[in-house]
Image (spheres, helix red, strand yellow):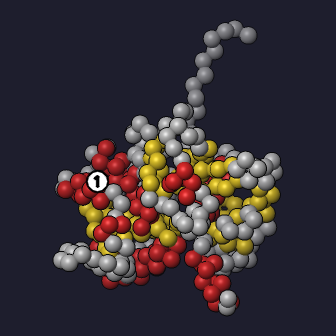
Amino acid sequence: MRSLVLRVPGWPGHLPGQHVDVRLTAPDGYQAQRSFSVASAPQDEHVMLTVERLDDGEVSPYLTEVLRPGDRLELRGPLTEWFVWEPSLGGPVFLVAGGSGIVPFMAMARTRAARRSPLPMRLLYSARSEDAIIYRSELDRLAAKGDGFDVVYTLTRTAPEGWPGPRGRVDEQLLAAIAWPPEATAQAFVCGPTAFVEAVASGLVAIGYEPPRIKTERFGPSG
Amino acid sequence: MTIKDETMRDTDMRLDGNVLGGVFSELFVEDMTRSRTTCAACGYAGPLAELHVYPQAPGMVARCPACSSVQLRVVADHRRWWLDFSGTRCIEVTLAATTPSAGEVIQEP
């Protein structure tokens, strides 16, 4: 996992949750392109992308290991107003992240904090182990403010002795315990690997969320 | 490899229609992921952002989330685009609420 901080002259500003397409062109003209969510908040000076390295990927090994400060990247974006939340869209908000699916939610949480929004936002974050939780200290700091943002981590593979939070995959039971009740008409966002997203979206429908209130962003393993 | 394995792998690799935002941004003025498509096969209408996209093909193949029929295909090379919307009966595009710019005449014609 690597966070890239980019200076993008003329960046038009983005909405929390938007993504960019990164295109790499080889000397022979071969092109590969992938989408990455923007992790930074719109008011931040630079654009931050957090990239997970996939061993057999075409793009992510380059971005995480080869790229050096001063190198240039071809970016397209910010893109689409679909998987987007900002305070004007209201709340409460329920975010469910699997692994690196946390990235667009960082932009949302950072924006909420920067704008001092009082709208309730709850994050359920599924990670393999405690070490695999990205942005842990920042998330804990945001939650400690007690201003309506809270986070629950669930560990799916290994949990340390005395781990206070839930263990195991996000299922209907965990969603029922953590999510805002359906009557709260929360907006739900789910981001992570495809199988994770589909299981969580089905679980949300099962506990009473209306499908139009659930937005999904699948991260394919094609990095 | 069994057929079952292949099916499972395909499902694991699909993305949302939202990922088409970039390629469409080169061709259309509006954010097409906000548009609604009607499936030519089953009549399901929903946001383009929620189609199931399989990016491993030479292009991008977007299937109906309700019936899995191919709704659209997008293939590009360096200078050309091929868009196959034959699986989409209708596309409803909502225009973004843009504020018109104020123009002031500063010189007589």
In the rendered image, residue B64, in percent from the top left (x then y), is placed at 66, 73
Picture quarter with the N terminus of chain B: bottom right
Q: Where's residue B81, x and y in %?
A: 79, 54
Q: Badge 1 is on which residue? A: A138
Left or right: A124, with B68 as reference point = left
Of B73 and A50, nearer the camera is A50
Q: Is residue A204 above or below residue A61?
A: below
Residue at the spot x=41%, y=47% of the render?
A40
Estimate the x, y position of residue A68 in percent, counting from the top left: 51, 44
Q: Position of residue A72 (x, y in %)?
A: 58, 40
Determine whether, in the image, residue A104 is placed left or right of residue A113: right
Crowding at dot 1, Cα within 10 Å, few <14 / some 14-19 / many 20+, comes out as few
Q: Residue at x 60, y 83 (%)?
A: B8
Q: Is residue B105 left or right of residue A217?
A: right
Q: Is residue B87 visible?
A: yes
Disc 1 secondary structure class: helix
Can the viewer see residue B31? Answer: no
Please say if A214 is above or below B33.
Answer: below
Looking at the image, residue B34 lies above or below residue A97: above
